[in-house]
Each structure stands twice: as structure tokens, then as C-alpha cells.
Amino acid sequence: MNKNDYIIRLETENDYHTVENIAREAFWNLSVPGCCEHYFIHVLRQHEAFIPELDYVIETEGKVIGCVMYSESKLADEKGNEKTVLTMGPICIHPDYKRQGYGKALLEYTFDRAREMGYDVVINFGNPDNYVARGYKSCFRYNVCFEGDVYPAPLLVKELVEGTFDGRKWFYHQNDADAPCSDEAAVDEYDKKFQPPKVKAWQPSQEEFYIHSHSVISDKR
Ligand SMILES: CC(C)(COP(=O)(O)OP(=O)(O)OC[C@H]1O[C@@H](n2cnc3c(N)ncnc32)[C@H](O)[C@@H]1OP(=O)(O)O)[C@@H](O)C(=O)NCCC(=O)NCCS
């Protein structure tokens, strides 16, 4: 893959089904049996926190093979000061094109666009393997946590502008765009729009997801 191999452009309505289908292919059985990410993309586009100007797809060989989306969330410090940050996700690359640098290209391109728009921080949950090479760090390093001083291990923070964090504690209040995804019946119903029908099954990556999603960072060792 080189820079001439691909085009990165804004998503259009004509891409919606293709993009959701890529998410379904990329996430199916990855974290849990089945997946909700195609439905999540569908509801996210309609959410007030969604940022259409940062809704990008990547094309190669004349077809869309991946996407990344962002929404706005809040950080609040202990005095109640608020700061708007980006929540990244979903990001996905079709399994046929994984691990060839397309995800990296999408992230780096959209980080530049986000910086131009004035954003200085990106936050997302994820497997650190996918993100540390993009400059993400543990939330613990920047003192970004959940209410109750919980620092989830998969909560990853990227400074788009170096030196944004000054050591004070920030509580991360993620927008609620993913709330409809807990409605399993709605997800299953939406999945019927896609072909071929898929079987929900266990695979080892689900245990990896379980471990990450139940882990917290602590300085007590
Ligand atoms: C995660 C995903 C978006 C990454 O996109 P990609 O095009 O496959 O990844 P890239 O080839 O651009 O590699 C991105 C980084 O992942 C890491 N990586 C790549 N191959 C890897 C491997 N085999 N094992 C572990 N990490 C690897 C590297 O850090 C790499 O960065 P580097 O090239 O600077 O070292 C894509 O694989 C995907 O859609 N996966 C399924 C859905 C998913 O997990 N989405 C993210 C939810 S948290």
C-alpha cells in the first residue's frame, strides 16, 4: 500500500449501507457473539453529538473498504470546568484489507482534519494494540477517569495538540450515542437488512475483549 493506492473522502448517503456492511464484516463475533456496530453507525449518524465533518471513508480498487466516525463528548474537572473532546469510533477496515496500513491512514488523515477544526483531544475505548502506534496513551497518564476515580485499561487518550493536559484530574462523560445498542432485539432486527445471514458464535478474541473491558489501571502494584 502506498499513498496513491487509496482515497480518503467524506461519507455520503450512498455509502451508508456499504459502510454498515463493512462494520458488520469487521466486528462480527469479534468482541461478543454477533455485533452491534452496523446498528451503532446507523443510530450514531442521527445523534446530536455526531460530527458529519469527521465522517470519513477510505476507498481502494474503486470501492469503499473502511470508515471512521467521531462524536463529541465532555471532560469535567473537579471544579466543574468542562472541555469538549472527540470520541473516536467506530473505526473499521474490511477483513480482506486489514493490517495493510489503511486504518493507520484513516486515523492520521482524520486527526489532521480534527486538529484543523480546533479539537485537541481524542478518546476511545479499544485494544491498545490498535492505537499505541498512533500516539494514544493510557488514560492514567493524563489523569482522565470515570466518576469514582476509575481508570479503565482500554480507555485510551490521544493529545492532538501536545501539552493539552496539565495534570489536573478530568472525568470523562461520554455521549450516550451507543445507548440504543443495548436493545438486542433492535440490533437483531436491523441485522436482517444485511446479507448473508450470519451465525453468532464464540471466538477467542471475545475473551481478549472481556479481559480488556474488565481491567482498570492502578498505581498499586
Ligand atoms: C482495528 C483496525 C481498524 C485497524 O486497521 P488496519 O488497517 O487493519 O490496521 P493498520 O494496518 O493500519 O495497522 C494499524 C496499527 O495496528 C497495529 N497492528 C497492525 N498489525 C498488527 C498485528 N498483526 N497485531 C497487533 N497489532 C497490529 C500496529 O500498531 C499498526 O500501526 P503501525 O503500522 O504504525 O505499527 C482494523 O483491523 C479493523 O477493522 N479491525 C476490526 C474492527 C476493530 O477492531 N475496530 C477497532 C475497535 S477498538
Image: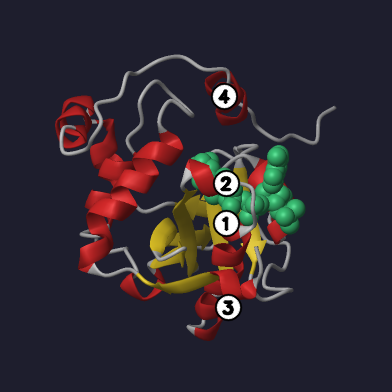
User: Which residue position holds label 2?
Assistant: 98
> Depth-wise, is mark 1 or mark 3 nearer the camera?
1
Sequence order check, earlier mark of 1 and 3 = 1
The Cα–Cα distance between marks 2 and 1, rounded to whole angstroms, is 8 Å
Given residues 63 and 41, the one toward you in this image is 63
Given residues 4 and 129, the one toward you in this image is 4
Q: Secondary structure at mark 3?
A: helix
> Depth-wise, is mark 4 or mark 2 nearer the camera?
2
x%, y% of residue 157? 63, 56
For the question of whether residue 215 can be seen, the reply is yes
Q: Disc 1 beta carbon < 8 A from ligand 1?
A: yes
Question: Label for residue 103?
Answer: 1
> Depth-wise, is mark 3 or mark 2 nearer the camera?
2
Task: Relative to 137, say whether 6 is above or below.
Answer: below
Q: Secondary structure at mark 2?
A: loop
Q: Is residue 90 left or right of residue 98?
A: left
